[in-house]
């Protein structure tokens, strides 16, 4: 590894931190004031709700419907942001940013025109939905470059995945080699900006790493480059015991272990993508969660540490679906049946959040996805009576006490309820 790379910091800026021109200018201030003098890699996700908009546009294209109106909205949103940046930064940025936007939107419209209902949905989704990160990262790089030489790099040259579309699995040796070869010489010259969420296959097709996967990208880069630390800049003060948009009187964890954080992310705490922690824990790289609205505040430090018992964490996961299987002849649910059910769930790519077994029925709680659920029903309806309810919400209380359970469950009808030593989970219709 090259010497210049000692002390590498990785900064990850999520959608909210680049949601408009003012946010992007704030990002530039943070880089200038807190980025230090050592090497800095900046991982950027798509602006605000761009990924949702691209999902909607792709859905229309796949259904053979007219998507021109939402595409125009997205394009003018990026153009208007660019004009504001040009006015607020320096005017000679104008031609670079404008050319980039025109070219990128041209490529996007070509991808959309090629969408074909007879080809794999997930594969084509990745080719379209990945554009948000490309657009945002290029805008950020142009504006940063105005003040200090800043390179932009397409992360598809670096992050190699398999063809597990929409949730690409990283091929670590190839990725590590590409990253350690390409990035150190660039980082030695100044900050480098790249994209979160996106990768590519061996044949060069674009993949994505799963919604909200930019945190994971930051961890991949940090792991490969043995970074000194990763900082995720968010619109919350740090890692809280609940989402402040949903709960009043939240508490900040100033310091917390990898293990606690991995579990919270697994249960659906939206502050960090669940895959982020493992690569960091493996190389002992500390993760800071800090607020881009209050960058001087210390935020949360996630690292290898011992701490006193934590206050209960409240985690809400909406969009859940309860699926129950009964054998058609009232036979007991056997290991052989479970093997068939688990196999079909894995093939349909539905992940189990909670499961429960009774004499003649077996139930699972999964994230609702209409297409995947249909695949499951097609596979199992011959053998089982399958019923499902969607529109449900799963709550998890981690490190619960009786008071925290009463606070959340009183007056609610619990469809499923489960208690382990450290978690209390229940499913409700909200
Ligand atoms: N832009 C992607 C998403 O909204 C990835 C990310 O934000 O981390 O899911
Ligand atoms: Mg995001």
Image (cartoon, grey):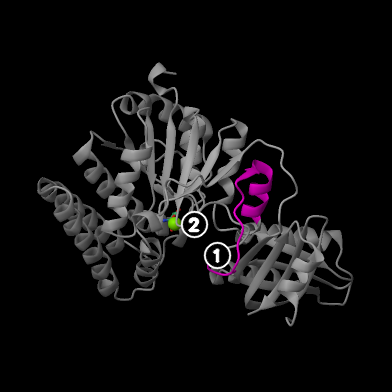
Residue 324 in view, yes or no:
no
Q: Quick one: SS at disc 2?
A: loop
Circle 2 crowding by C-alpha within 10 Å: few under 14, some 14–19, many from 20: some
Q: Name the residue under label 1.
A: 244
From the viewer's side, name the closer residue of 64 and 251: 251
Mark 2 or 1 closer to N-term?
A: 2
Residue 231 x/y as whole percent: 47, 42
> Where 416 falls versus 124 (above or below)?
below
> Where 197 falls versus 396 (above or below)?
above
Residue 406 x/y as whole percent: 77, 73
Location of ligand 1 given as a quarter of the image: bottom left
Q: Residue at x 23, y 45 (%)?
A: 143
Q: How far apart are marks 2 and 1 (CA)?
A: 8 Å
Tell me if the residue at label 1 has its CB under 8 Å from ligand 2. no
In the image, which residues are magenta? 245-266
Residue 171 x/y as whole percent: 52, 36
From the viewer's side, name the closer residue of 337 and 26: 26
The N terminus - image quarter = top left
Q: Residue at x 64, y 67 (%)?
A: 376
Circle 1 crowding by C-alpha within 10 Å: few under 14, some 14–19, many from 20: few
Q: Mark 2 points at which residue?
A: 236
Residue 232 is a magenta residue:
no
Q: In this view, does 359 lie to the left or right of 259?
A: right
Residue 92 in view, yes or no:
yes
Q: Are marks 2 and 1 in contact (CB under 8 Å)?
A: yes
């Amino acid at each position: 590894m090259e010497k210049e790379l000692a002390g590498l910091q990785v900064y990850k800026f999520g959608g909210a931190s680049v949601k408009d021109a003012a946010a992007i200018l704030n990002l530039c201030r943070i880089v200038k004031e807190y980025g230090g003098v050592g090497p800095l890699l900046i991982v950027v996700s798509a602006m605000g709700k761009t990924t949702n908009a691209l999902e909607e546009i792709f859905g229309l294209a796949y259904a053979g419907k007219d998507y021109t109106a939402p595409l125009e909205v997205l394009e003018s949103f990026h153009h208007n942001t660019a004009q504001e940046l040009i006015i607020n930064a320096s005017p000679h940025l104008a031609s670079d940013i404008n050319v980039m936007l025109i070219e990128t939107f041209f490529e996007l419209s070509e991808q959309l025109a090629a969408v074909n209902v007879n080809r794999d949905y997930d594969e084509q989704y990745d080719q379209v939905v990945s554009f948000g990160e490309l657009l945002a990262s290029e805008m950020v790089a142009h504006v940063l470059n105005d003040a200090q030489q800043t390179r932009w790099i397409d992360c598809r040259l670096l992050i190699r995945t398999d063809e597990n579309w929409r949730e690409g699995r990283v091929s670590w040796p190839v990725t590590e080699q590409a990253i350690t070869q390409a990035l150190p010489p660039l980082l030695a010259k100044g900050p480098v900006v790249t994209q979160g969420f996106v990768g590519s296959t061996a044949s060069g097709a674009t993949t994505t790493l799963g919604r909200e996967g930019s945190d994971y990208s930051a961890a991949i880069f940090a792991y490969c480059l043995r970074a000194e630390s990763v900082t995720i800049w968010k619109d919350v003060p740090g890692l809280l015991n609940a989402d402040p948009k949903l709960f009043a009187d939240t508490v900040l964890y100033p310091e917390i272990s990898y293990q606690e954080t991995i579990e919270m992310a697994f249960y659906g705490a939206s502050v960090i993508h669940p895959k982020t922690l493992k690569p960091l824990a493996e190389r002992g790289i500390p993760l800071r969660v800090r607020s881009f609205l209050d960058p001087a505040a210390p935020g949360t430090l996630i690292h290898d540490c011992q701490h006193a018992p934590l206050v209960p964490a409240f985690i809400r996961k909406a969009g859940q679906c309860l699926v129950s299987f009964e054998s058609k002849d009232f036979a007991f649910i056997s290991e052989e049946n479970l093997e068939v059910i688990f196999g079909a769930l894995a093939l349909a790519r539905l992940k189990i959040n909670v499961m429960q077994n009774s004499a003649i029925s077996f139930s699972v709680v999964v994230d609702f996805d209409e297409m995947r659920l249909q695949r499951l029903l097609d596979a199992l309806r011959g053998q089982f009576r399958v019923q499902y309810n969607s529109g449900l919400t799963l709550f998890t209380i981690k490190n619960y006490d009786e008071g925290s359970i009463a606070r959340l469950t009183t007056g609610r009808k619990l469809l499923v309820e489960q208690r382990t030593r450290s978690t209390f989970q229940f499913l409700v219709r909200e």
